[in-house]
Image (tube, rainbow, N blue to C red):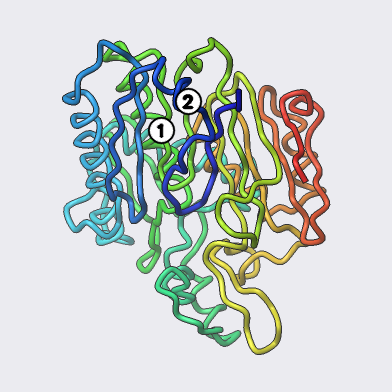
């Protein structure tokens, strides 16, 4: 019998499992796919006692969190913080506060490679919209005046947040899917779910085991190849896997350079460090999402050294020449399928 595979994409739906119909029929499944966080999101619950209300309520929960955290929702905490940049503290939901604290912590830990105040640069490049525009050096330097995680001031006692400088823009695009998928996992577990797969735009979170009682196997997309072509399968007891790379949202300039959506805060340009993809494997989906970006920006050498110092987190690097490098702690869980 074939193993179950979930294909990781940055912005794609969950691909059908490569499994015999007889295997699938052994475990009842409730599936729902919806559009949220500007991507396609799928939840699959494997539980004979589950009804559709739980999965429908899960997506209501997802949309509620998105409305709390998206800077593009005018009533969100993040939109209000951005609107009051340089002016005043904004009272926020405790979940917003905790997430921002975690973001600031990992910004410091990665020496600024991960930074949620990149809004001015994200808007300037506007790669998400498909615009193929290379900003001038002066435009980039001007936008960089308004970035820096140290501009995020947190008042825990009053559950309030302020941006120190007018023009600073928080954008949670590099962490929101990870955080919301983690919170959705906790929500489902709280409802008694023991086996499920959450795929929010390629951020994979697993609950429990497959029908055999084994860890789910997850296939990792081969960069710049057709969707569904994977180079590795991961079967780990770690429940969260997130990939970031330069192959999903990008354009090639007339100079032959690939300009993608992962911006290096130190330069203001898309990170250019010989990497095509980084996959983080760990227990915490928020951390996996944060580090998939931060480690990509740091590059293979610094990123490898950084991950080696953290317990229970593994990383797979795919270099631009297709060479694959991974940390020792996950080698037994990864099957390379070249």
To which quarter of the image does residue 28 belong? top left
Q: Where is residue 55 in the image (x, y as percent from the top left)?
A: 24, 28
Compared across the picture, whether 306 is left or right of 66 comes to right
Describe the element under mark 1 as helix, strand or loop. strand
Q: Nearer the viewer, residue 335 or 19?
A: 19
Query: Does 325 sit above or below residue 275?
Result: above
Query: Does 132 sit above or below residue 325?
Result: below
Query: Does 209 sit above or below residue 7?
Result: above
Q: Nearer the viewer, residue 154 or 65?
A: 65
Instruction: Work out how far the residue at label 2 is from the one at label 1, CA to CA, in angstroms.
Output: 6 Å
Q: Mark 2 points at which residue?
A: 206
Describe the element under mark 2 as helix, strand or loop. strand
Q: Are marks 2 and 1 in contact (CB under 8 Å)?
A: yes
Q: How crowded is mark 1: few (under 14 residues within 10 Å), some or many (20 or more)?
A: many
To which quarter of the image does residue 335 belong? top right
Which residue is located at x 52 percent, y 42 percent?
A: 289
To which quarter of the image does residue 8 belong? top right
Q: Where is residue 337 in the image (x, y as percent from the top left)?
A: 75, 41
Q: Residues within 10 Å of mark 2 (few under 14, many from 20)?
A: many
Q: Which mark is residue 198?
A: 1
Q: Nearer the viewer, residue 65 or 279?
A: 279
Which residue is located at x 71 percent, y 66 percent?
A: 272
Which residue is located at x 50 percent, y 15 percent?
A: 209
Nearer-N-terminus badge (2/1):
1
Compared across the picture, whether 295 is left or right of 90 comes to right
Compared across the picture, whether 166 is left or right of 12 comes to left
């Amino acid at each position: 019998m074939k193993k179950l595979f979930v294909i990781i994409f940055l912005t794609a739906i969950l691909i059908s499992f490569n499994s015999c119909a007889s295997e699938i029929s052994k475990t009842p499944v409730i599936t729902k796919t919806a559009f949220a966080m500007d991507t396609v999101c799928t939840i699959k619950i494997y539980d004979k006692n589950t009804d559709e209300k739980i999965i429908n309520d899960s997506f209501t929960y997802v949309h509620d969190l998105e409305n709390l955290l998206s800077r593009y929702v005018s009533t969100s905490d993040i939109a209000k913080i951005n609107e009051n940049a340089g002016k005043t503290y904004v009272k926020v939901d405790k979940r917003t506060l905790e997430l921002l604290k975690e973001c600031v912590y990992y910004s410091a830990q990665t020496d600024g490679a991960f930074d949620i105040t990149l809004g001015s640069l994200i808007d300037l490049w506007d790669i998400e919209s498909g615009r193929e525009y290379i900003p001038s050096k002066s435009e980039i330097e001007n936008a960089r005046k308004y970035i820096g995680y140290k501009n995020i001031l947190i008042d825990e006692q009053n559950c309030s947040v302020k941006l120190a400088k007018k023009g600073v823009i928080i954008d949670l695009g590099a962490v929101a899917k990870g955080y919301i998928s983690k919170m959705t996992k906790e929500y489902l577990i709280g409802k008694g779910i023991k086996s499920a797969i959450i795929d929010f735009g390629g951020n994979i979170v697993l609950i429990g085991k497959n029908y055999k009682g084994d860890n789910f196997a997850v296939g990792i997309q081969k960069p710049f190849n057709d969707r569904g072509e994977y180079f590795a399968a991961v079967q780990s007891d770690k429940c969260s896997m997130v990939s970031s790379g330069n192959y999903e949202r990008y354009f090639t300039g007339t100079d032959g350079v690939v300009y993608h959506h992962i911006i290096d805060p130190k330069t203001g340009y898309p990170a250019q460090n010989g990497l095509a993809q980084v996959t983080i494997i760990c227990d915490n989906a928020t951390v996996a999402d944060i580090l998939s970006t931060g480690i990509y920006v740091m590059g293979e050498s610094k990123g490898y050294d950084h991950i080696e110092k953290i317990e229970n987190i593994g990383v797979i690097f795919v270099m631009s020449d297709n060479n694959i490098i991974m940390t020792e702690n996950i080698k037994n869980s990864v099957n390379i399928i070249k």
